[in-house]
Image: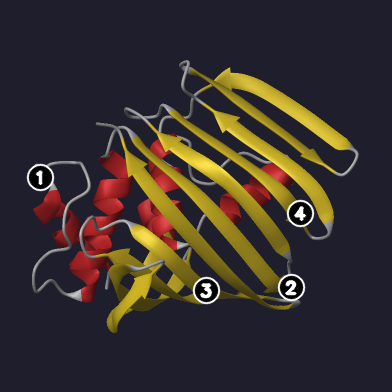
Amino acid sequence: MRPLLAVASATLVGCAAGPRPLPSGGTPGERLAACEEVVTNAAGLSGSFEIQSTGAHSAKLTGTLELQQKNALRLVADGTFDGAPVHLELDARSGELTRSSSKGASVASHHGPVPAELRAAISVGLVRMGLLHNLAQLSADEPVDFAEAGAGVRDALQPLEPMDGGPDSVNGTPCKRVTYALAVKGTRRAEASVCLAEATSLPLERRQTVHFDQGDMSVTERFTWTTAP
């Protein structure tokens, strides 16, 4: 499956970076690549989200993701993770990275240079694996996965056998589902279904089952997107 996604992504290079309709007659892999290209490269894109998980890890989070030019972004989330109240924030809009988190009574804050692949790590991670993983990283006072130069988020996270999941709608917005298995560093770790808005290629909802040694985790993530005029 990796060569197909690579070809699909390459085909999209040079197209307008903003939200646009899903490829007419596109394969499931091409739809997923179109979504990824928009989320990775669009400027002035903001989303609010609701995330809930049960099983091996429980979470209930709401927040916002603001994507500006290149690595300028801000991610904020509040709620609970594994039973503890959390406030999570990642801000790289000033050219410096601020990462802060509170979980229960624990509070941490870090400042430093912006990792070279921060936008790709957040965006590709959101489309292929879901946003909860990196929110869990922040709640554990850990940096975003695969954000450093050469970390290779696209190689580390591989959608396997994307399939057409059929038409659907989320909050009244028409979308098309793509289902696939997810390999993390070569090992199959999850099965996912993501619904991509027909008019914008943006992800509206993803459902995922993640396999851990201690059991499975079921996750639902919902997004509402706005773009700058």
Amino acid on which disc 3 is placed? Gln
Q: Mark 4 points at which residue?
A: 80
Amino acid on which disc 1 is placed? Cys
The residue nearer to you, when weighing 200 against 55, is 200
Q: Quadrant of residue 119?
A: top left
Label 2 sits on a secondary structure element that is loop
Q: Which of marks 1 and 3 is nearer the N terminus?
A: 1
Q: Name the residue under label 1.
A: 15
Density class for disc 1 (Cα within 10 Å; few <14, some 14-19, many ≥20) is few
Return the x and y of residue 215 as percentages of the image width and height.
72, 80
Q: Mark 3 points at which residue?
A: 208
Q: Distance between the residues labelled 4 and 1?
A: 39 Å
Q: How far apart are marks 4 and 3 (CA)?
A: 19 Å
Please give the name of the residue rendered at 48% of the width and 41% of the height, measured from the top-left corner: 65
The residue nearer to you, when weighing 113 against 76, is 76
The residue nearer to you, when weighing 47 against 94, is 47
Left or right of residue 97, residue 204 in this image: left
Please give the name of the residue rendered at 83% of the width and 59% of the height, measured from the top-left corner: 83
Q: Between tags 4 and 3, which lies in front?
A: 4
Counting the numbered discs, the total is 4
Please give the name of the residue rendered at 64% of the width and 20% of the height, measured from the top-left corner: 111
Q: Distance between the residues labelled 2 and 1?
A: 41 Å
Q: Earlier in the sequence, mark 2 or mark 1?
A: 1
Q: Distance between the residues labelled 4 and 2?
A: 14 Å
Q: Mark 2 points at which residue?
A: 56
Label 3 sits on a secondary structure element that is strand
Q: Earlier in the sequence, mark 4 or mark 3?
A: 4
Q: Which of marks 4 and 2 is nearer the N terminus?
A: 2
Label 1 sits on a secondary structure element that is loop
Return the x and y of residue 206 as percentages of the image width and height.
46, 68
